[in-house]
């Protein structure tokens, strides 16, 4: 019900002040039908654990997941980080737009339901305080909040804290990414004990950040951790 009121609210607002499409700047919709059509979706030939796409149609677990120490159960992403969705995510990062977040949260709802995960609560990968201060908000929450409204699940933003300053992961190798975020997070045991938790992020590349968040949650006695991101970058 709450979710329908929110959707209705954004629709009414869009009639009064028509938005521009975050993918192509055309007036009328927040993410237009043409951009939705051009969004390259990640289909079923993926690693069953980390969701990394591979050519072929078989079910398997990738080499990296067979050897890495993983703390999450599954990680899934909606689309490849390219074309209109890359532009839309960029917009979400630099302009707090909950209406756009609401539109882009719908595929995350579908993905969550399609995977039949049992979730107790939703949270988002926290930004470090400097970045949060500079930007004023965490763009992952622009996706996580509407996801919570739409599914009726609780969202708890304070369960994971950054306890170490990290560099941006952009341009780092797989190994350096792991080192950069190792021990970067701490979770609140009384909030996560025995809970199945879904972590939301906008883009994933190697999954090191989500794995590091999952490690903090599992060490604080969470039951299980899942990760969901809007896009996946296949370039390091
Ligand atoms: Zn568009
Ligand atoms: Zn994998």
Image (cartoon, helix red, strand yellow):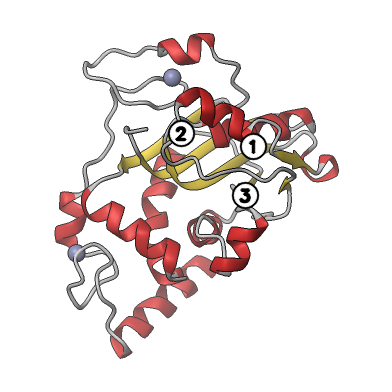
Which corner quadrant of the image does residue 31 belong to? Answer: bottom left
- How many labels sit on residues? 3
Residue under numbered circle 2:
172
Left or right side of 97 for 81: left
Cβ of mark 2 under 8 A from ligand 2:
no
Left or right side of 182 for 204: left
Residue under numbered circle 1:
213
Q: Residue at x 50, y 62 (%)?
A: 142
Mark in the foreground, 2 or 1: 2
Q: Earlier in the sequence, mark 2 or mark 1?
A: 2
Residue 148, compared with residue 2, is above or below; it is above
Image spot of residue 222 (x, y percent): 74, 33
Left or right side of 191 for 68: left
Image spot of residue 19 (x, y percent): 29, 78
Q: Crowdedness of circle 1 by 10 Å Cα count: few (<14), some, many (20+)?
A: many
Q: Residue at x 58, y 70 (%)?
A: 136
């Amino acid at each position: 019900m709450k979710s329908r009121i929110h959707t209705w609210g954004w629709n009414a607002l869009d009639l009064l002040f028509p938005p521009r499409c975050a993918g192509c700047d055309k007036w009328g919709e927040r993410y237009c039908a043409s951009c939705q059509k051009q969004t390259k979706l990640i289909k079923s030939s993926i690693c069953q654990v980390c969701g990394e796409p591979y050519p072929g149609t078989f079910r398997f677990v990738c080499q990296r997941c067979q050897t890495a120490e993983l703390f999450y159960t599954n990680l899934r992403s909606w689309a490849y980080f390219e074309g209109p969705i890359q532009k839309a995510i960029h917009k979400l990062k630099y302009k707090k737009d909950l209406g756009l977040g609401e539109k882009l949260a719908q595929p995350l709802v579908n993905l969550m339901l399609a995977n039949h995960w049992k979730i107790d609560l939703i949270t988002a990968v926290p930004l470090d305080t400097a970045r949060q201060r500079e930007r004023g908000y965490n763009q992952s929450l622009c996706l996580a909040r509407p996801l919570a409204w739409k599914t009726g699940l609780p969202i708890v933003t304070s369960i994971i804290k950054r306890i170490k300053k990290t560099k941006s992961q952009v341009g780092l190798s797989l190994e350096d990414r792991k080192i950069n975020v190792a021990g970067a997070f701490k979770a609140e045991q009384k909030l996560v004990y025995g809970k199945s938790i879904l972590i939301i992020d906008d883009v994933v590349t190697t999954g090191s950040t989500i794995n590091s968040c999952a490690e903090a949650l599992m060490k604080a006695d969470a039951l299980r951790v899942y990760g969901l991101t809007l896009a996946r970058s296949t370039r390091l």
